[in-house]
Image: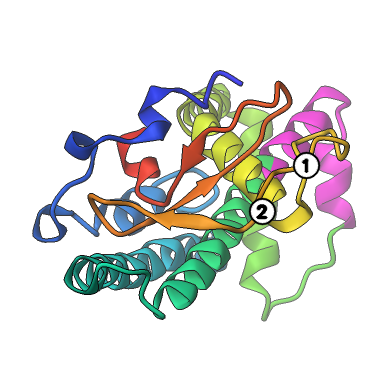
Amino acid sequence: MDFVSHKFQGCGESYKNLDKIDFSIIPTKIKKLPFFEDDVFLGMQAMNIGVVDQLITHYEYALLDEYNAIDRTPDSTMAVSALSQMWIYSLYEVLRMWRNRKVKFEKLQKNGGIYSKVKDMIDDPLNQTVKTRKQQMLRFKDDLQYRDHINAVWNDIEEIYRAAELIRINLAKHCAPGNDNIIPMSPGYARINDWCGALDFQLIVKNKDYPEIDNRSYYTA
């Protein structure tokens, strides 16, 4: 898979010091993406990714300090590993929801079904989410620039989505994507990254390569 490249392997120069990390990047930039920008609750889910990421990062660097001080695997590694895996699952779900909305709108646009879908959605004056979804669908139908922007955004985030998908399948399903006969050697097992304290999970892909990836790798993509 092309997205499992050197930039997801990580190196010392790829990881910033804790005080140099701009934790506003995820919550501020992701909220500006189509679907997230005008859907309040979907946007909240996306922003939660950034909030939890900041918490985990502090735990990771604390873990690294402890690891260097005692020269053995700290007991806190288990907690950081658990939080990291849950973050990966959450990141994947948010991106999958975004992608599914894009794909669904495209299918409705192609078969001329957007107006029918909007008409069938039940109106509720207390449900702003329904109103927003209808507005998004109608805008998608009528606004070529909006559709082009959504496609451009997907081109930017697909690599991160595919990486999250790969690690999620390895961790949650204990197999390679699309092939449950290819099984990771140690699903869920990880090593402490020497530069930032993140957990480096060893994955398996369809060609039976064994790349390693961690949460910080998303910053280097």
When the figure is inspected, residue 145 is found, relative to residue 15, above or below; the finding is above
Residue 219 in magenta stretch: no
Regarding mark 2 in the picture, which secondary structure is present there? loop
Query: In the image, what residue occupies the spot 86% across and 28% down?
Result: 112
Residue 103 rendering spot, x and y as whole percentages: 73, 35
Residues shaded magenta: 100-120
Given residues 135 and 82, the one toward you in this image is: 82
Question: Which part of the image, by quadrant, shows the N terminus?
Answer: top right
Q: Residue furthest front?
A: 71
Question: Which part of the image, by quadrant, shows the C terminus?
Answer: top left
Left of 155 or right of it: where is 31? left
Badge 2 is on which residue? 187
Given residues 122 and 49, the one toward you in this image is: 49
Query: Within 10 Å of the Cα at label 2, are there few (<14), some (14-19), or many (20+) other Cα atoms?
Result: some
Residue 126 placement: quadrant: bottom right
Residue 109 in magenta stretch: yes
Badge 1 is on which residue? 183
The Cα atoms of the two marked residues, 1 and 2, are separated by 8 Å
Callout 1–callout 2 Cβ contact below 8 Å: yes
Query: In the image, what residue occupies the spot 38% across and 42% down?
Result: 217
Amino acid type of the residue tagged 1 in the rendering: Ile
Residue 146 rendering spot, x and y as whole percentages: 52, 30
Residue 142 rendering spot, x and y as whole percentages: 64, 29
